[in-house]
Amino acid sequence: MRVEARALLLAPAEDVWRLLAEPYHLTDWWPGYQGVEPDRRGLAPGARWRVVRGPTGVATGGLLRRPGATGTLVIGEVVEGRTLSWHDVEQRVDVRASLHPAPGRRTEVEVVLEAPGWRIVLEGLKPVPRKAARRLFDLCQTAAEL
């Protein structure tokens, strides 16, 4: 099953990409992770990052995951300035964030989460892409030109 969300961010694509491309900022915008340790390759296809699950709550750590537990992300597609994807090994979900330049030095972001349908429903994962897009909007809002 696939769930997705889009948002128009009030920042140019290159600024948004800098946020996405910094491994330590993942916890700022992706719900459910409270810590991340990238491997020595950083943001590169095949890199393996260790993540620490966030506090309890359906859409944060999943019903079947303990808060504070660690997990592994395997970085998938990385297209500079455009796309970042990963696979969460323990939660068995695939995530992709895609950036699309928009008029007025804005950026449209599309966040997609794919997982077996029962996991999306049982663990309450459906709102996660929307929450991630909203967090990105909030982070970019602070730097928006008025």
Image (cartoon, rainbow, N blue to C red):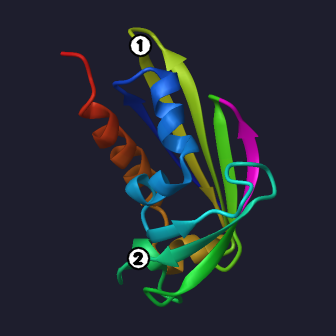
Q: Where residue 18 sits in the image (x, y, percent)?
A: 51, 35
Q: Is residue 66 above or below residue 71?
A: below
Q: Position of residue 3 (x, y in %)?
A: 56, 54
In the displayed structure, does residue 22 sit left or right of residue 88?
left
- In the rendered structure, find residue 15 and report the number of the disc placed on it: none
Q: What residue sits 76% from the left and 45% below the top?
A: 77
Dot 1 amino acid type: Arg
Tell whether position 75 is magenta.
yes
Tag 2: Cα neighbours inside 10 Å, few (<14), some, or many (≥20)?
many
Q: Is residue 90 left or right of residue 10?
A: right
Image quadrant where one finds the N terminus: bottom right
Q: Position of residue 37 (x, y in %)?
A: 58, 67
Residue 91: quadrant of the picture = bottom right
Residue at (68% x, 31% y) in the render: 80
Q: Secondary structure at mark 2?
A: loop
Give the residues in magenta: 74-80
* Residue at the disc numbered 2: 54
Circle 1 packing at 10 Å, graded few (<14), some (14-19), many (20+), is some
In this view, which residue lies farthest toward the top? 104
Seen in the picture, residue 125 relative to 10 is either above or below; the reply is: below
**Contact (Cβ within 8 Å) of mark 1 with mark 2:** no
Secondary structure under the numbered disc 1 in the rendered image = loop
Residue behind mark 1: 105
